[in-house]
Image: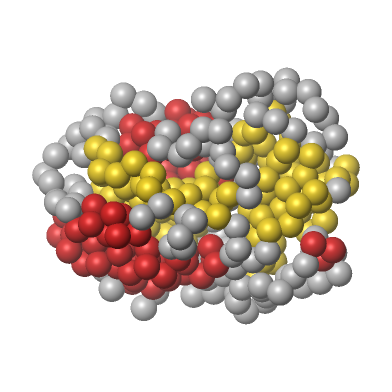
Amino acid sequence: MSLLARPCVLALLPVFLHASPCSLACQAQQPQAGTIRVSTSLVQVPVSVTDAEGHAVKDLQLEDFSIAENGSPVTIAHFGEAGETRLEIVLVFDNTGSVFLHFAFDQQVAADFLRSVFRPHDAVGILCIGSAPEILLNQTTSLGEALKSLSQLRPSLAATAFYDSVIAAARLFHVPMDPDTRRVQIVLSDGQDNLSNQHLEDAIREVQQADCIFYSINPGGPNVRFNLVSLRGQQAMEALAEQTGGVAFLADKKEALGEIYGRIATELKAQYLLSYYSPDAKMDGSFRRIGVGVPKQPELRVRARQGYYATKGPAR
């Protein structure tokens, strides 16, 4: 079984094939890939660390990490141990197109994923992609309620408003953001859009403003790269993932979906959350680069959001 994933920096998935950045992803980039936006001087940075074999490293401590903003070292104010901080998850399902054929299987693997990662203090929302975004479940802390909503998903032959749906999903996250919380949007889709009022750049901006990591799972298989429409859909999801520190997965067959959800679950369970106060308290809308390292263990591979926009007032 082979899986493909972007961005290529993910050592977590050693069986994935690496490809050079696509033109659409590059055109959609903001000043620096992997950006978020904050409305105070407190900056929260989810961090994933793997060894040379791609295995998650979960035993690091605060003193093992270093953070720099715009090249200048900053002091880590708070350290969230691997997988311990709260999760807010929004699951997004494309119930049209290529996903239509295997919908019951998709529902089952998504339910298994939720059971594996969900804890009593976590929250989850569910949204469907169709001719318009359809919110099935607003944020809830009830796993039973989430699983019930998943079971009520139904396939559709409607048109696909992908970008509008990604934006609607980003807006399901609570405002203001709860402290010590990681936000995740997981989208099961081929990324194709034929109806949205919004565009890729709008979707990237909204996901950044929601301070969430974007993961996508494309069940279309590697052949999507031989079809222009399918390729553009995958490239759009790669751009969203690269901007937010997430991953755009491409499965070679439907049976790979469970493995991909498992990979995401493994990453979330091993993900640290580092927080620091920016030395520049001005909320002037400027872009500020973030660099995260593990100086005493340079052989480890670190993946984190690479920057943020400092903005006044609420993110949206």
* Residue 82 found in image quarter: bottom right
One can see residue 148 in this view: yes
Residue ID at (17%, 53%): 152
Residue ID at (32%, 47%): 126
Please provide percent x and percent y for residue 43.
Answer: 71, 41
Dividing the image into 4 quarters, which one contains the N terminus? bottom left
Q: Is residue 15 above or below residue 155?
A: below
Please provide percent x and percent y for residue 47.
Answer: 66, 57
Q: Is residue 312 above or below residue 274?
A: above
Please provide percent x and percent y for residue 15.
Answer: 49, 75
In this rendering, position of residue 56 left or right of residue 111:
right
In this rendering, position of residue 257 left or right of residue 8:
left
Please provide percent x and percent y for residue 114.
Answer: 37, 63
Residue ID at (46%, 63%): 119
* Residue 9 found in image quarter: bottom right
Is 16 in front, or is 184? 184
One can see residue 222 in this view: no
In this rendering, position of residue 40 left or right of residue 25:
right
In this rendering, position of residue 150 left or right of residue 124:
left
Count of residue discs: 0
Is 28 in front, or is 175? 175
